[in-house]
Amino acid sequence: MYIISPLSQCTSVDKSEEFLSHLKEIAATTHANEPNCYAYAWFRSAGDNATVPSHWLRGFEVYASIEANQVEHRASSEYKAFRTAVSERHLLERPSDLRFWYPSGIGFLAKEKGDVFQRGEEGGKVQYLVTDEFVVRSGAKEEVYSQLRAVAGVAEDAADVLTFWVQDRYGKNGSSDGGGGVYEVYVLIRCSKREAFETFWKQIQTAWDQISQLVEDRRRTNWVESGIGFLSR
């Protein structure tokens, strides 16, 4: 699988809303017409991000192949209209990072199929997401991954933890550092609500503290569902 998780740096709150309006159209046609796209969802800031401005957005997309992402997905009229708007309306401060991540073999994207977002932020509790990105220090990969496997086991048993999925730049069949001496990791955590995440975090705090001692260049950001997209079929 080929995964992208753009951190889209919208230029203002209004531009962020315009950006999302296009993504809503893309999500609908992607779900209906692109079976090789396994997940396509976008999230708003949870409002408690110290790391990024509150009008930035985060996407999470999973494809069966490079062609599914770069040919099939980009062929729709909705996507083409979006790209035109991004350029002509200056919706972004700079292009989003579209480099691929790959499944590490640790954790799960969804516990149930057909996980489609259908609501916005208004009314009731919304799903709460955390993304944690970091670089593993030289020689520490096995220890970090051992801790992540343990945390994934806790997540499996927690009913309100809906996603705990670990990706890296090389995948479970790749080399230890891709030959470059740097091992980047991306963790997606999704819970039924913020309070559920706080409960889960208390359970895994010791393990995550140990992970934190073994990584650098860490960036953690918090998000809520926007009512756009799906995370399984």
Image: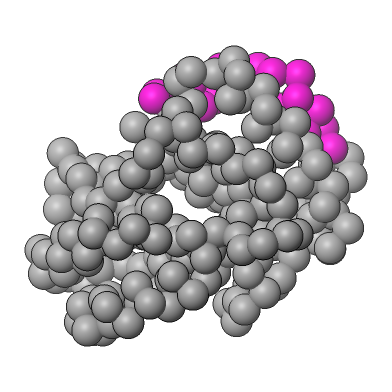
Q: Position of residue 118 (x, y in %)?
A: 65, 41
Q: Visible in this render: residue 8?
A: no
Q: Quadrant of residue 56?
A: bottom right
Image side of residue 134 versus residue 42, left or right = left
Q: Which residue is drawn at 37% across and 44% down?
A: 110
Between 96 and 12, the residue placed more toward the observer is 12
Read off the magenta span.
64-85
Q: In the picture, which quadrant includes the C terminus? A: top left
Quadrant containing the N terminus in the rendered view: top left
Quadrant position of residue 127: bottom right
The prevailing secondary structure element of the residues shown in magenta is helix
Q: In this view, does 31 lie above or below 128?
A: above
Q: Where is residue 109 in the image (x, y as percent from the top left)?
A: 36, 45
* Residue 82 among magenta residues: yes
Q: In this view, does 69 lie above or below 115?
A: above
Query: In the shown orientation, is residue 43 left or right of residue 173?
Result: right
The residue at the point 43 percent across, 78 percent down is 198
Point out residue 36 in the picture as x, y percentages from the top left corner. 45, 20
